[in-house]
Image (cartoon, grey):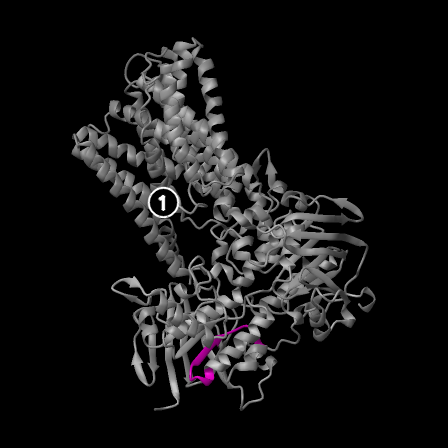
Amino acid sequence: MSNTILEMRDITKTFPGVKALQDVTLEVERGQVHAICGENGAGKSTLMKVLSGVYPASTFDGQILLDGQPVEFKNINDSEAAGVVIIHQELALSPFLSIAENIFLGNERSKRGFINWNDTNLEAAKLLARVGLRDNPVTKIVDIGVGKQQLVEIAKALSKKVKILILDEPTAALNDDDSAHLLDLIKSLQSQGITSIIISHKLNEIKAIADKVTIIRDGKTIETLDMHADEVSEDRIIKAMVGRDLESRYPEHESTIGEELLRIEDWTVHHPLDASREIVHQANLSVKAGEIVGIAGLMGAGRTELAMSVFGHSYGTRISGTVYKRGVPIQTNTVSNAIKNGLAYATEDRKRYGLNLIDDIKRNVSGAALGKLEHLGFVDASKETTVAEGYRKSMNIKAPNVSVLTGKLSGGNQQKVVLSKWMYSDPEVLILDEPTRGIDVGAKYEIYTIINALADQGKGVIVISSELPELLGICDRIYTLSEGRITADVPRDQATPEYLLKYMTQEREAPVNERDI
Amino acid sequence: MSATSDLKNPRQDLVPGKQPGPLGSAATYLAGQLRQIGLFIALLVIVIFFQIATNGITLRPINVSNLVIQNSYILILAIGMVMIIIAGHIDLSVGSVVAFIGAMSGVMITQWGLPWWVAIILCLILGALVGAWQGFWVAYFGIPAFIVTLAGMLAFRGAAQIALQNQQISPFPSQFRALGSGFLPAFGTSGYEPLTLIIGAVAAIAIVLSGFRGRAVRRKYELEDEPFAWFIVKMAFTVALVVYVAFLLASYSGTPIVLVVLGALVVIYASVMRNSVFGRHTYAIGGNLQAASLSGVKTKRVTFLLFVNMGVISALAGLVFTGQLNLASPSAGTGFELDAIAAVFIGGAAVTGGIGTVPGAIVGGLIIGILNNGMSILGVGTEYQSLIKGLVLLAAVAFDVFNKRRAASSIK
């Protein structure tokens, strides 16, 4: 048998009006980890949907060879029967069923229509052991974190006798620990003979685990690099992805810092369902005019919870502490009060919390400041269009006009709509939660430029991010958050990844000595 | 934002809905409007079918007049219902509220001896209180509207029976009855009644003017993708319809008062939903509740007010219905909620909220009304009427789902 387990030949897939894939060719060797890289909208996910039967064989041109044999998948069941299993970016687990029930969902261990629970849970436990998860298989999915849910998905794939495992952005929602664990797991699956195809934006991960990387741009295969043979740098991959040299991933920027705009003192927040659990503990932080301040923390450190509780008490109960604007205490107990007092919060999850995806660009842009367009209770629709049109041009939102539904935009353009919405509300302080999550490299650069421009206008910007290089690249000052506590306040020139990580992982038992910072 | 315009990386990636050729544009546009066009074509086909099947009875002046009057309360309810459904809720209690308000109007007028106009005002206030009661539980207490209004459906039916002590109340003063079955005072003695023709002409002119104005504004901002020929066809059709109905009504007894009420409600609520801040907030809540709330929309207050509004509208429908029958009955309004909900969904609203229009709900209500009316003339039994209405509702929503799937596959 040849060493090639999978070959996709001249795959062309067209949607009405758009050629999503054009003569794409992919060759994957047995037992390797093969990465697929490309900007958003390049066609990576479409290619994987073609491979996994989401798009039936009749809807695209080209050929798929599995172990040298041509195959035609009519649906996902066909592809899974052949050992090709895809794990989507948005996990597809049923939250109120147990781990074991989810693993065997659609593939139940049963006799004459009745579930054999012993067999189900026993088999599930074996599979969980293979993915290094020690939870009880009867635990409900809602009770475990995203990182573990990802492992359950993989266990589910293993239960289907997977030969080729496709992972679409598997670490997008994971913290560094969980990501590292997942990457280790992919390595160990590799030693068990499972071939993996991994779609990822994170170049350091690709460098860490991939044997080969195929780069796709604008629906075409650009090249396949052998990570072992060639000297492949991250810049090399980026260059192929964007089709040009990227001089720097972060725009040059020198902040002009003015007076203090916002100060948060002794901010304490409790869990909304378990009021005895402290999520944020006596946090103190401030931002000055023209300053870009970062908040670094591992997942679960309370970053989003801190931001959302400040912004109109949108998270948590038993919230205490004071918010000062220019030294004067202000009320931020409702979202409209927070907005009135010059705050804006752009969420980390724009699809769930940021946009009305079934409405158009202009109505999303005006959403947080309809009052500015109001006349006797009615919205000035032509002014609204002018405003939105202005942002479409200045923010470089790629859409033919402002009547396009936001659900049809790419991630980067959706994020620009969210930012436009908050800019139009005339805030003095913007809290941007993961502003570049799920956005490709080129659009990230645009977002950074926008953040810099906001600071140059004298606004205070707080950036929450899981990506340390990003914080180091754009912030003037970085707070580290660990277990709901601010553990350090680090100026730009002292900040290194190692230094930040030390404080991001500082545990509660060892209180911070202020003088050490 | 001058800094963002000189970005280093201008990218030309795939823009959704990129400009098709000039020839393709009209077809593309019409394909995008398939739902709307389909709705009107369905209405037209149904009218023509019954016109032929009933040997011309359907479009006789007296029948058109009856059609308007007999469907008015469902259409009124559909206006409130579409707003509730756009916000992602539902109201199952409207039929019982119609009965309850009808009962109370009877009690107020015949037992308490209140003047008819005082009774009307009190009943509308009572409707607002009913809505406030349900809105409180939905908005501020967080109980799903389905449960709250199911409870309301039972409770207000009971309240109606208690108020009437399981008796019927009749008759009502003529001024009160006029709201449901009266006509605007007629001028002239023979031929076409002039006031009705004038109203029809004014309505037609208003439609044309607002159509052209809207188009001019959209053109100015380069948002117009509607082919001009299609615009003209649509305008001509609408105007012809309005004028035709005006002539039919004018040759019978003139303009039903309830049509004026209904017309005013449609114009007001359509514009509230399309252009007002409140309407925007309603769509925002139904489209994405969390996003709306994080944008500073007072989601609880909007939900509460929507239910208050539904209560007032149900009360109005109750008054119209009671006036029309000249009877307050404990079993009035049974099943109205289902007709109103069906009208809204036939009119293109989404079960998940965020999508729907007032005119759509009205057309949906007319389709149901004409089906009822035509089948009654043909002597189709109520069992078959119910069967056919059920299938029409299913077909309309199936067409929606099919359309959406087609649209989704063209995006990505």
Per the image, is A199 magenta?
A: yes
Q: Residue at x 34, y 91 (%)?
A: A1
Residue furthest top in the image: B113
Nearest the camera: A316 or A457? A316
Using the rendered image of the protein, determine whether residue A409 is visible from the camera's viewpoint: no
The magenta region covers: A190-203
Left or right relative to B155: residue A429: right
Q: Is residue A452 above or below residue B130?
A: below
Q: Amino acid at mark 1?
A: Gln
Q: Residue at x 33, y 41 (%)?
A: B346
Using the rendered image of the protein, determine whether residue A389 is visible from the camera's viewpoint: yes
| Image spot of residue A237 (x, y percent) | 56, 80
Q: Residue at x 25, y 40 (%)?
A: B45
Residue furthest front in the image: A118
Q: Is residue A379 above or below residue A389?
A: above
| Image spot of residue A416 (x, y percent) | 59, 58
Q: Quadrant of residue A234?
A: bottom right
Q: Is residue B105 above or below residue A395?
A: above
**Few, some or many residues within 10 Å of mark 1 (<14, 14–19, 20+):** some
Nearest the camera: B177 or B331? B331
Nearest the camera: B92 or A65? B92
Residue furthest right in the image: A515
| Image spot of residue B130 (x, y percent) | 46, 27
Q: Quadrant of residue A484?
A: bottom right
Per the image, is B340 magenta?
A: no
Residue beneath disc 1: B36
| Image spot of residue B236 (x, y percent) | 35, 38
Nearest the camera: B271 or A477? A477
Left or right relative to A309: residue A264: right
**SS class, disc 1:** helix
Chain identity of mark 1: B
Image quadrant for the N terminus of chain B? bottom right
